[in-house]
Image (cartoon, rainbow, N blue to C red):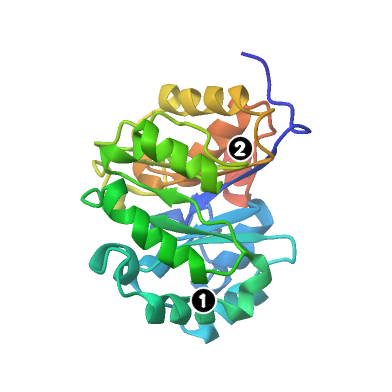
Amino acid sequence: MSRMNPQNMELKIGCTGWSYDGWSGTFYPKRMPKTEWLQYYSKIFPITEINSTYYRIPDQSITKKWNTDTPDEFSFTAKFPSIITHENKLKNIKEHVFKFLASLTPMYEKVLALVLQLPPSLSFSEARPRLEELFSYLPEDFKYPIEGRHESWFTDEAIEYLKEKNHCLVWNEVQGVNNPAIVTSDYVYIRLIGDRSIPESKFGKVIVNREKVIQKWSNKLKEIQDKVSLAMIMTNNHLEGFGPSTANTLRMQLGLEELIWDEKKQKKLEF
């Protein structure tokens, strides 16, 4: 297929998180302290998805540092806390939602999207009235991609509803989910997660080559480049073992330049 024309669709490609011990010496300079990792990451990538917000609502002192450590043009996305999406399944969550939104205040202007990753057990019909209530009090400052994993999210009824509301149905590469990658809004959000066959202890280098899988998604992006104005793509270590490398593979398949970080430069010199 043809190369991506970046003038047609804005591309923001990043990783799901940045704080992985296995990246020390492969992405981050070996002696760089963890406190400087985000600052370094944000010089290489334009965006990241914060996964830690799924497990706990961060203190404002943390989000203030995230804001300080990144340039003005950097973007964050963040997952809604599990107490909202998984434990309560979108019911009786108003207090938790407001607490989560308040935690993001110091970095508010850099937050591009808040991701509603829903459990596989939550069907579209169950979620629909709860989403209606949730969106009645969510601010319009952010995008809210919805990652439905129950098969009912891919039915005609669900797709029609999402298109009507301009809600993005997340495209994902996740074990057990057969995602048809349908455009339901004026942007797309893609999560290249993979399975969990690669343990965290192996993160930091490519363990499994999934270039063909990445090619499938790059082809999808090329097909829709004239249909949406923005694509956010997040790569996870579980896909190949090393999120930054996966992001680079995708970039090059789309005709974008390879990103080079200090450890990659060093290895090229040694070679």
Q: Nearer the viewer, mark 2 or mark 1?
A: 1
Q: Which mark is residue 128?
A: none
Q: Amino acid at mark 2?
A: Lys
- The residue at 58%/29% (across/down) is 221
| Label 2 environment density (alpha carbons within 10 Å; few <14, some 14–19, many ≥20) | few
Mark 2 vs mark 1, CA separation in Å? 43 Å
Q: Amino acid at mark 1?
A: Leu
| Residue 234 seen in the figure | yes
Q: Secondary structure at mark 2?
A: helix
Q: Quadrant of the N terminus?
A: top right
Residue 235 in the image, given as x and y percentages of width and height: 47, 44
Residue 148 in the image, given as x and y percentages of width and height: 35, 46
- Is tag 2's residue or tag 1's residue first in the polypeptide sequence? 1
Which residue has dot 1 on it? 101
Residue 42 in the image, given as x and y percentages of width and height: 64, 59
Residue 190 in the image, given as x and y percentages of width and height: 49, 41
- The residue at 30%/53% (across/down) is 200
- The residue at 38%/31% (across/down) is 156
Q: Quadrant of the C terminus?
A: top right
Front residue of 195 and 240: 195
| Label 1 environment density (alpha carbons within 10 Å; few <14, some 14–19, many ≥20) | some
Front residue of 174 and 250: 174
Residue at far top of view: 1
Q: Is residue 75 positioned above or below 63 on the image?
A: above
Q: Which mark is residue 268?
A: 2
> In terms of image quadrants, where is residue 210?
top left
